[in-house]
């Protein structure tokens, strides 16, 4: 529920800007995948864990930085995220495996580092800068 509430807060803060549904959908999808990964993997088995999310506009798009104090990513790197082949039957669609592919496909400049027990994931979503920014 915390991820859902965080996403709602970000999307609510973007409402005053002239953004189309596709841009808002891209932001929501990328943030949802990244935040859900933190909850499912970095804080797996823990009752709670803090996530710090910062978004900054620039002419190149929306720059996002997400920090947590959960477990380090495997091998100290963000996964590559390869495309998962789709099955012939919709019912055979796998539960997961799309997250990192979507994050990398819909954003740019993806980087990950861990320093002093803090994971930092940064990326840029290429969307036009809102009017008045």
Image (cartoon, rainbow, N blue to C red):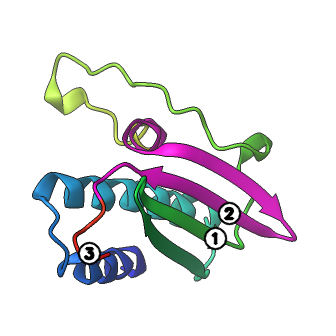
**Closest to the observer: 111 or 47?**
111
**How far across and down, in percent of the image, does residue 120 sit?**
68, 63
Of labels 3 and 1, earlier in sequence is 3
Q: Which residue is mark 2?
A: 120
Rendered-image quadrant of the C terminus = bottom left
Q: In the rendered structure, which disc, 2 or 3, sits on the residue that comes first in sequence?
A: 3
Q: Quadrant of residue 4?
A: bottom left
The answer to whether residue 12 of the structure is visible from this angle is yes
* Circles 2 and 3: CB atoms closer than 8 Å: no
Question: Residue at coordinates 56% horizontally, 44% vertically from top-left?
Answer: 109
Instruction: Specify whether residue 102 is painted magenta.
Output: yes
Q: Is residue 66 above or below residue 60?
A: below
Task: Give SS at disc 3.
Answer: helix
Asked if 4 appears above or below 21 in the picture, the reply is below
Residue in front for this viewpoint, 63 or 88: 63
Do labels 3 and 1 touch, CB within 8 Å?
A: no
Badge 3: few (under 14), some or many (20 or more) residues near its Cα, within 10 Å? some
Horizontal relation, residue 98 to residue 117: left or right? left
Q: CA distance from mark 3 to mark 1?
A: 19 Å
Are discs 2 and 1 less than 8 Å apart at CB? yes
Residue range highlighted in magenta: 100-128
The residue located at (48%, 61%) in the rendering is: 63
Q: Out of 68 and 20, give the one closest to the viewer.
A: 20
Q: CA distance from mark 2 to mark 1?
A: 5 Å
The residue identified by callout 3 is 11
Q: Residue at x 18, y 78 (%)?
A: 15
At 12% across and 58% down in the image, what residue appears? 21
Left or right for 8, reference 68: left
């Amino acid at each position: 529920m915390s991820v859902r509430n965080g996403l709602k807060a970000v999307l609510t803060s973007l409402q005053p800007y002239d953004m189309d549904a596709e841009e808002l959908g891209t932001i929501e999808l990328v943030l949802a995948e990244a935040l859900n990964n933190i909850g499912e993997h970095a804080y797996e088995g823990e009752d709670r864990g803090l996530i710090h999310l910062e978004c900054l506009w620039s002419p190149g798009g929306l720059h996002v930085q997400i920090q947590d104090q959960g477990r380090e990513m495997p091998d100290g790197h963000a996964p590559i995220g390869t495309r998962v082949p789709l099955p012939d039957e919709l019912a055979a669609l796998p539960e997961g495996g799309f997250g990192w592919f979507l994050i990398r496909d819909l954003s740019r400049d993806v980087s990950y580092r861990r320093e002093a027990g803090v994971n930092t994931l940064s990326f840029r979503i290429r969307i036009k800068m809102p009017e008045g920014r």
